[in-house]
Image: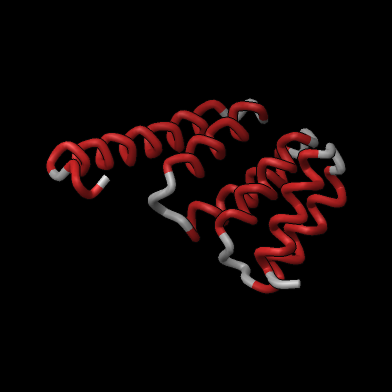
Amino acid sequence: MNKEDHYNEGMELFAQDKLEEAVAAYLRALEEDPNHADALHALAMTYAHQEKFDQAIEVGKRLIEVAPDDELAYTSLSIFYQKQGLIAEAEQIAAKARTLSWKRELREHKDPDKS
């Protein structure tokens, strides 16, 4: 199996609410490619679903290193911080997500063919 197979397996397991097995599948994908953004995001969301917010935050931070222009990565990390009661951190990350969104909207407005 390759990283995409492991990732897809994790998604199927998550859908079946087999969260520990999903985590294991995402980790296998990340063993093959530590920068697999989709697997990082899915792993973070699975940890959050398990209410393991410390782990979700750790993986969320890694995700924004790998995908610094991913608005959803920042939004997710902000939610993880909120769930931990880390409001200042959540607001800072949410502001970054809004900035990325505005930049994307400006690019799309300037050249609608590139959206």
Residue 114 vs residue 31, the one in the foreground? 114
Residue at x 38% of width, y 33% of height: 95
Residue 71 vs residue 84, the one in the foreground? 71
Q: Is residue 72 left or right of residue 113?
A: right
Numbered circles on residues, count: 0
Residue at x 40% of width, y 37% of height: 97
* Colouring of the image: secondary structure
Q: Is residue 82 left or right of residue 69?
A: right
Residue at x 25% of width, y 41% of height: 103
29 lies above or below 67: below
Place of residue 115 in the rendered image (x, y in percent of width and height, measured from the top left): 27, 45
Q: Is residue 64 left or right of residue 85?
A: left
Q: Quadrant of residue 100?
A: top left
The quadrant of the rendering that contains the N terminus is bottom right
Q: Is residue 101 left or right of residue 12?
A: left
Residue 99 vs residue 20, the one in the foreground? 20
Place of residue 72 in the rendered image (x, y in percent of width and height, measured from the top left): 48, 40
Place of residue 28 in the rendered image (x, y in percent of width and height, measured from the top left): 76, 66
Residue found at the far front of this picture = 113
Residue 4 vs residue 81, the one in the foreground? 4
Place of residue 9 in the rendered image (x, y in percent of width and height, measured from the top left): 77, 55
Residue at x 68% of width, y 65% of height: 30
